[in-house]
């Protein structure tokens, strides 16, 4: 069973930056996709950004140009750098791993952006 360990959430003022990190508990071999989703109260969970093991990236329009997703395959760690944060970015952010026909979720980390 793979567990995803997230870190980096918190409270930040509008215009500030945060970096989220996610690392699986074990080694991941073969093609996979890691990503960040977020869910605000009353809203559905939505994709923020994803990155494949080969480096291909995908971003939601709402964060494009303000966020950068990256990964260190040697450390099996994924990062999401978020800049120019807005109050509407406030949500619980969940790490996601799709690997070997299975999907795993982290526990979630709260990001709160104050105006």
Image (tube, rainbow, N blue to C red):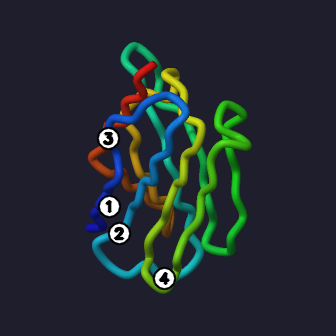
Question: In the rendering, at what x and y percent does residue 31 appear?
Answer: 59, 74
* C-alpha separation, residue under disc 3 versus residue under disc 2: 21 Å
Going from N to C along the chain, the mark reached first, 4 or 3, is 3
Secondary structure at numbered mark 2: strand
Secondary structure at numbered mark 4: loop
The quadrant where residue 51 appears: bottom right
Q: 15 left or right of 19? A: right
Residue positioned 28% across, 63% down in the render: 3
Q: 64 left or right of 26? A: right
Going from N to C along the chain, the mark reached first, 4 or 2, is 2
The residue indicated by pointer 2 is 24
In the depicted structure, whether residue 31 falls above or below residue 70: below
Q: Mark 4, residues whose alpha carbon is within 10 Å: few (<14), some, or many (≥20)?
A: few
Going from N to C along the chain, the mark reached first, 3 or 1, is 1
The quadrant where residue 66 appears: top right
Q: Mark 2, residues whose alpha carbon is within 10 Å: few (<14), some, or many (≥20)?
A: many
* C-alpha separation, residue under disc 4 versus residue under disc 3: 31 Å
Q: Which mark is residue 4?
A: 1
Question: In the rendering, at what x and y percent does residue 75 appear?
Answer: 43, 81
Residue positioned 32% across, 51% down in the render: 106
* C-alpha separation, residue under disc 4 versus residue under disc 2: 11 Å
The residue indicated by pointer 4 is 29
Quarter placement of the N terminus: bottom left
Determine whether label 2 and label 1 are within 8 Å by CB: yes
Going from N to C along the chain, the mark reached first, 1 or 4, is 1
Q: Select label 4 or label 3 by which is in front.
A: 3
The residue indicated by pointer 3 is 10
């Amino acid at each position: 069973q793979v567990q995803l360990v997230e870190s980096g959430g918190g409270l930040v003022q509008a215009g500030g930056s945060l970096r989220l990190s996610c690392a699986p508990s074990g080694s991941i071999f073969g093609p996979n996709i890691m990503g960040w989703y977020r869910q605000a109260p009353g809203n559905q969970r939505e994709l923020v950004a994803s990155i494949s093991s080969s480096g291909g990236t995908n971003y939601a329009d709402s964060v494009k140009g303000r966020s950068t997703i990256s990964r260190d395959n040697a450390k099996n760690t994924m990062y999401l750098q978020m800049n120019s944060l807005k109050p509407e970015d406030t949500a619980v952010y969940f790490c996601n791993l799709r690997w070997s026909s299975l999907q795993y979720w982290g526990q979630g980390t709260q990001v709160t952006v104050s105006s």
